[in-house]
Amino acid sequence: MDRVMTGIQGLDEMLNGGIPAKRHIAVYGGPGCGKTSLCFEYLYRGAKLGEPGVYVSLEETTDDIVENMGSTFPMINDVKDLMDEKKIEILKPDKLDLEEVAGIIENSITENGVKRAVIDSSTMIRMAFKSEIEYRQTLFEFLSLLRGLDCTSLTTVEATTASRDEMKYDIEHFVMDGIINLYNIGKEDRRIRALEIMKMRGTAHSRDLVPFKVTPSGIKVYVGEKVF
């Protein structure tokens, strides 16, 4: 099986070597869980491996993303160089439309050989639909289109809570090829970020809940460690 290494320390070990190629994964979590950081590092590590990526932002501007990620990860001081070389693209659609997002990704694959994509976030698109049924149908059509493209994508999905105990299953949990859940778990006076791979079609994977940290040199997933 072809796999795409995320390059994130510990995560590829949990994924038995990486994400199965051409699969489309939701990164699901509440505020402050590290969704954007994980997705951006996935693109950055890919670019450094010679696999161009596109970041489709439905909320923040390109400058905001570059500035925020530069503050989070001081080690990625060459992002602008990678953008100039078209190894990383950050694009913001004119409207909240899944068809337009798919078109952007398809064009990036054709023009720049993009192998990795990030969509941040599906929640913004969902808000544009009048009914849940309409969103569900459009999401199915969107994923069918993505599966015909030669790329492996991560899509952020906002949860209403950062707590594992209060997390609710949503439509994305059922239709996406994989789900990586991120949590910000509180105990007494501490909060610890934690991660679990809820599902990953086509591969064996760890089902443990493990702590992770967003460090200046990248995300570190502490495989085999307990959260508390």
Image (cartoon, grey):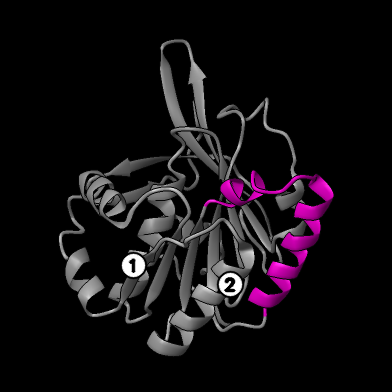
Q: Kindly identify the amino acid type of the residue bearing the numbered disc 2.
A: Ala
Please tell me which residue is depicted at 61% across the width and 51% down the height of the picture: 125
x then y, percent, for residue 94: 47, 61
Please tell me the numbered disc located at residue 19. Answer: none
Where does the N terminus fall, quadrant-wise? bottom right
Please tell me whether residue 123 is drawn above or below residue 83 in the rendered image: above
Q: Label 2, label 1: how many angstroms apart (C-alpha)? A: 23 Å
Question: Regarding mark 2 in the picture, which secondary structure is present there?
Answer: helix
Please tell me the numbered disc located at residue 102. Answer: 2
Q: Residue beneath label 1, please? A: 45
Residue that lies at the very extreme toward the front in this rendered image: 94
Q: Kindly identify the amino acid type of the residue bearing the numbered disc 1.
A: Arg
Question: Regarding mark 1 in the picture, which secondary structure is present there?
Answer: helix
| Label 1: few (<14), some (14–19) or many (≥20) C-alpha neighbours in 10 Å | some
Q: Is residue 138 left or right of residue 67?
A: right
Q: Is residue 135 left or right of residue 67?
A: right
Residue that lies at the very extreme toward the top in this rendered image: 188
Q: Quadrant of residue 149?
A: bottom right
Please tell me which residue is depicted at 41% across the width and 70% down the height of the picture: 54
